[in-house]
Image (tube, rainbow, N blue to C red):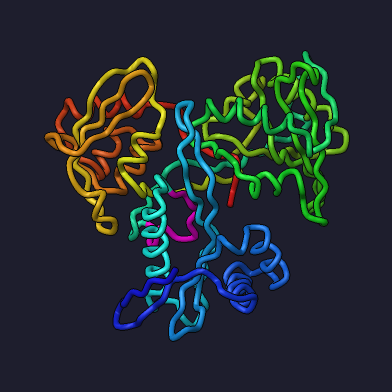
């Protein structure tokens, strides 16, 4: 597989890696881009899978690359096939040459050819990815609370240490993921980072509830930094109110040795709702970006509210994937979407506006005020009904 593109009179070739020297070169570029050691980046590349590396060459020399991560993403009880993009890096001497733009354009075109509905990434800078059709899709948040301030001592359920290789974690995660817009349908590579930590890390896994009837789990690590002892919740699931109370009481029981507790959750975190006081603070919030690769496949594979039966007339523009351009009719019934070409095009938007509408990060009214979509009052109202849902977020960074 190879494709050539000419940008600003500089010609680049997009391809897979063909030798161990290619892999080593790509790892070396990543080490410079992400301030890591070459050994760390080589190990990361191998974990991601050499077959998932894509590189960009100029005059046959590798000047950059990225890694694709095939997986899925949950929306309204259904999972949409998605390819994550990670490790986007360009050699310092080739930055500003158009290599990054060429790399992303060709990667998106490859995904379209492979019938991938959507793609997600975490941007170092938004400008590049917006130029190729990505837009803000959801949140990745980190929270922190002083251990002494939790003040929940009731523990309704037992907590049992369980090996990280147990299937119980997969089963419980999937039950929670079905109800969270944006959650990953994790592939094994993502899971391995949780159940197979590096030599520098030690993770401890606990099931909340009985093994016969589990209601959640918590996976933690502990470390010291800046004269403080930190407990980090690596991964968690709470399926019931009793599990949520037990989650907090279990963490509170560490207060004699732990100063602060950190966890990842939504910007609107339901875990904190049962805490007696608002003592937690948001450490940071980052927006991941989504691109609709194939309009028809994305809108037809997404889950919708089962109580809706309606129709939306769309007109979509995409500067990169010509096949996405045109008017569509999206029909919703029994939680499923059916899309056909044609219609009146009453809601007009480009591929970026569709991304934020698709995830539900912003309402149609908010997108209209931001100049991302335009439509009749009825079309805006119908879109609000179709794409309403909880704020999208994900637990995982890649």
In the displayed structure, does residue 135 sit left or right of residue 92? left
- In percent of width and height, residue 177 lies at 57, 30
Q: Is residue 127 visible?
A: yes
Residue 385 included in the magenta stretch of the image: no
Residue at point 70% right, 47% down? 192
Q: Position of residue 179 (x, y in %)?
A: 53, 25
Instruction: Classify 383 as above or below 187.
Output: above
Task: Name the quadrant containing residue 173.
Answer: top right
Residue reaching furthest left? 344
The one nearer the camera, 268 or 6, is 6
Residue at image point 45% right, 27% down? 76
Q: Is residue 249 rendered to the left or right of residue 109?
A: right
Give the quarter of the image for residue 165: top right
Q: Which residues are magenta?
A: 119-129
Residue sitting at x 47%, y 29% = 78
12 versus 347 height, above or below: below
């Amino acid at each position: 597989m190879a494709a050539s593109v000419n940008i600003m009179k500089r010609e680049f070739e997009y391809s897979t890696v063909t030798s161990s020297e290619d892999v080593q070169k790509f790892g070396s570029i990543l080490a410079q881009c992400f301030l890591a050691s070459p050994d760390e980046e080589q190990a990361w590349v191998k974990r991601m899978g050499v077959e998932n590396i894509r590189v960009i060459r100029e005059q046959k020399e590798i000047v950059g690359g990225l890694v694709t991560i095939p997986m899925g993403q949950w929306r309204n009880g259904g999972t949409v096939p998605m390819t994550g993009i990670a490790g986007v890096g360009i050699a310092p001497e080739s930055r500003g040459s158009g290599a990054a733009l060429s790399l992303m354009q060709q990667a998106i075109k490859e995904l379209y050819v492979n019938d991938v509905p959507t793609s997600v990434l975490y941007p170092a800078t938004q400008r590049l990815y917006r130029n190729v059709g990505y837009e803000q899709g959801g949140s990745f948040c980190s929270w922190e609370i002083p251990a002494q301030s939790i003040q929940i001592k009731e523990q309704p359920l037992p907590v049992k240490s369980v090996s990280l290789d147990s299937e119980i974690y997969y089963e419980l995660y999937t039950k929670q993921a079905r109800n969270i817009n944006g959650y990953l349908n994790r592939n094994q590579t993502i899971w391995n980072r949780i159940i197979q930590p590096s030599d520098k890390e030690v993770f401890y896994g606990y099931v909340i509830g009985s093994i016969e009837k589990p209601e959640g789990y918590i996976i933690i690590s502990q470390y010291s930094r800046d004269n403080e002892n930190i407990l980090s919740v690596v991964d968690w699931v709470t399926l019931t109110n009793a599990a949520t109370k037990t989650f907090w009481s279990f963490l509170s029981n560490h207060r004699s040795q732990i100063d602060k507790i950190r966890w990842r959750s939504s910007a609107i975190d339901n875990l904190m709702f049962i805490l007696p006081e608002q003592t937690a603070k948001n450490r940071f919030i980052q927006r991941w970006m989504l691109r609709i690769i194939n309009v028809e496949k994305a809108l037809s594979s997404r889950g919708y509210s089962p109580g809706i039966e309606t129709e939306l007339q769309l007109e979509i523009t995409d500067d990169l994937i010509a096949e996405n351009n045109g008017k569509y009719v999206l029909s919703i019934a029994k939680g499923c979407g059916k899309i056909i070409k044609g219609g009146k095009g009453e809601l007009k938007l480009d591929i970026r506006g569709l991304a934020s509408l698709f995830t539900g990060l912003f309402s149609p009214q908010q997108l209209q005020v931001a100049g991302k979509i335009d439509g009749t009052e009825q079309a805006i109202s119908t879109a609000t009904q179709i794409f309403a849902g909880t704020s999208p977020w994900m637990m995982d960074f890649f």
